[in-house]
Image: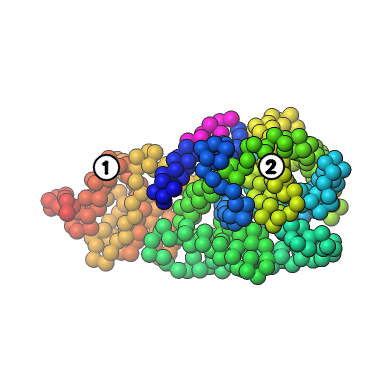
């Protein structure tokens, strides 16, 4: 197909996927299921668009996951997850290890898979999915610590699982000792953490002290900094995912210019990455081969959800209590066990052994696909019910207040910024003397680097910056009045000055 046809098809898929998000939101399903369905519909099993490259899927998938993790870090409130980080790190390391071992032992015994392939299978399924967790749990009224554990875990556990899958899928994976495996994993995590903790603060400092010529450049710069962290860590043989998440977490919680615009841009980029990622994975799947993967997939998924995940939670929380990092009650443990959603990450990770030519990896990919679809369909919509039954929901818990300029558009209002230049007759005028129309008001004054809410008698000075909110209907009238007062003072109307030009 020509480029124009690809653009048309791609745009059509994106628009259809966006329209389907509302349906998924109402039903409580993670949107990934709908996007995977689009991929199956347009792929070789549907309309026949060919896509059969696990190597390309792996590269695109890892890049898309980096974008999704960056958005997760940028939109995570550190004050909400800070107390949850120790337990989240325990789940992302000890919990992941327990899950890998339990799943590997189970599939080796139940499905007759060799040891190395069984470990790969366990590693592929060990990580919870950031996109699935964020999309479902941020709509649930949960206590801050419980929600924080799940969010932070989904951000942290990608790094060790990716490392584990890559090492186990390598040519020498069957010969690697446990000590070598742990050493390489630790080194990659340390390098990734160091890069993230260096790029994040440095980027925040630079963005606060460099005045960019356009506000739209700030969101691009922030996202670019997260990929500087990702690429730098990978080149130094560190964990790119840990680096990008830490960088984004630091930038997202720093006082940067245009934070609302940056967050909106990151969310848009993450949605686009999710749509492209899930559609691509759906196209890679072969519907003809799926029936043979249903039974082993359901067996493995049942072991994962009912045994491996709960055991990893129990071990991690018990170790956390033993280290005096805090105790988690059985109700919270039960919810943590059920809320360990799998999504795109296991499917992407399944392309790594497939691309590496690991024996049985194509069947592994199909089984992981079945597990993600079936158990996401089972767990996602039932989370609110499970939270109520376990008594862990918090209906009265305050949610983050998202503040941006979009509500002004809904109210048909505009935000104006006025800087008082030297020689302007706005100097010395009190705010009430501006005599703005009823639909407008001066809401903030920035003077000498400090901002304050003005009173009616506040006098305007040269070099002040005024922020005004005005309805769209009277915006022209407001602008004319400000021009008139700037030229002729508070009695401009008496002198016939209307500020028309």
In this orientation, does residue 102 appear? Answer: no
- The numbered disc on residue 226 is none
Q: How far apart are marks 1 and 2 (CA)?
A: 60 Å
Q: Which residues lie in the magenta part? A: 18-27
The residue sitting at 41% across, 57% down in the picture is 216
**Number of the label disc, if any, that sits on residue 366:** 2
Q: Which of marks 1 and 2 is nearer the N terminus?
A: 2
Q: Categorize mark 2 by other alpha carbons within 10 Å: few (<14), some (14-19), many (20+).
A: many
For the point 57% across and 37% down, the residue is 45
Question: What residue is pinned by disc 1?
Answer: 474
Location of residue 233 with respect to 454 vertically, above or below: below
Foreground residue among 370 and 459: 370
Image x and y of residue 436, in percent: 27, 46
- What residue is shown at x 66% (from left), y 33% (from top)? 377
Can you give x and y, in whole percent of width and height, for residue 53 in the image? 60, 52
In the rendered image, the vertical position of residue 350 relative to residue 198, given as above or below: above
Q: Which of 496 and 387 is in front in this view?
A: 387
């Amino acid at each position: 197909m020509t480029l124009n046809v690809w653009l048309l098809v791609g745009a059509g898929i994106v628009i259809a996927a966006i329209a389907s998000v509302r349906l998924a939101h109402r039903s409580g399903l993670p949107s990934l299921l709908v996007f995977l369905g689009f991929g199956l519909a347009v792929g070789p099993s549907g309309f026949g668009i060919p896509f059969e490259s696990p190597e390309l899927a792996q590269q695109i998938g890892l890049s898309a996951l980096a974008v999704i993790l960056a958005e997760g870090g940028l939109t995570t409130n550190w004050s909400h997850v800070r107390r949850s980080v120790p337990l989240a790190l325990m789940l992302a390391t000890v919990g992941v290890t327990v899950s890998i071992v339990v799943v590997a032992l189970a599939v080796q015994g139940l499905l007759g898979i060799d040891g190395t392939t069984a470990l790969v299978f366990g590693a592929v399924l060990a990580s919870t999915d950031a996109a699935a967790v964020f999309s479902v749990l941020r709509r649930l009224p949960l206590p801050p610590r419980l929600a924080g554990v799940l969010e932070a875990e989904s951000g942290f556990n990608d790094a060790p699982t990716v490392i584990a899958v890559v090492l186990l899928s390598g040519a020498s994976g069957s010969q690697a000792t446990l000590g070598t495996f742990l050493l390489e994993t630790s080194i990659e995590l340390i390098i990734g953490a160091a890069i993230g903790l260096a790029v994040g603060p440095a980027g925040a400092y630079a963005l606060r002290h460099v005045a960019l010529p356009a506000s739209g450049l700030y969101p691009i710069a922030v996202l670019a900094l997260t990929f500087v962290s990702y690429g730098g860590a990978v080149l130094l043989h560190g964990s790119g995912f840990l680096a990008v998440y830490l960088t984004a977490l630091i930038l997202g919680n720093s006082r940067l210019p245009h934070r609302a615009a940056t967050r909106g841009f990151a969310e848009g980029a993450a949605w686009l990455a999710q749509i492209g990622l899930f559609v691509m994975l759906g196209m890679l799947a072969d519907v003809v081969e799926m029936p043979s993967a249903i039974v082993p997939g359901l067996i493995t998924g049942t072991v994962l959800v009912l045994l491996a995940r709960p055991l990893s939670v129990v071990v991690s929380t018990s170790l956390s209590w033993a280290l005096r990092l805090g105790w988690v009650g059985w109700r919270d443990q039960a919810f943590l066990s059920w809320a360990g959603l799998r999504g795109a990450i296991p499917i992407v990770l399944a392309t790594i052994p497939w691309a590496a030519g690991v024996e049985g990896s194509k069947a592994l990919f199909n089984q992981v696909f079945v597990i993600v679809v079936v158990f996401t369909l089972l767990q996602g919509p039932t989370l609110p019910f499970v939270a109520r039954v376990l008594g862990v929901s918090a209906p009265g818990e305050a949610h983050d207040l998202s503040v941006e300029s979009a509500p002004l558009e809904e109210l048909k209002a505009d935000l104006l910024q006025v800087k008082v230049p030297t020689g302007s007759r706005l100097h010395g005028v009190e705010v009430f003397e501006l005599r703005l129309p009823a639909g407008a008001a001066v809401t903030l004054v920035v003077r000498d680097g400090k901002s304050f809410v003005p009173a009616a008698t506040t006098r305007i000075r040269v070099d002040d910056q005024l922020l005004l909110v005005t309805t769209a209907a009277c915006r022209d009238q407001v602008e004319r009045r400000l021009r008139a007062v700037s030229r002729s003072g508070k009695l401009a109307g008496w002198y016939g000055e209307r500020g028309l030009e």
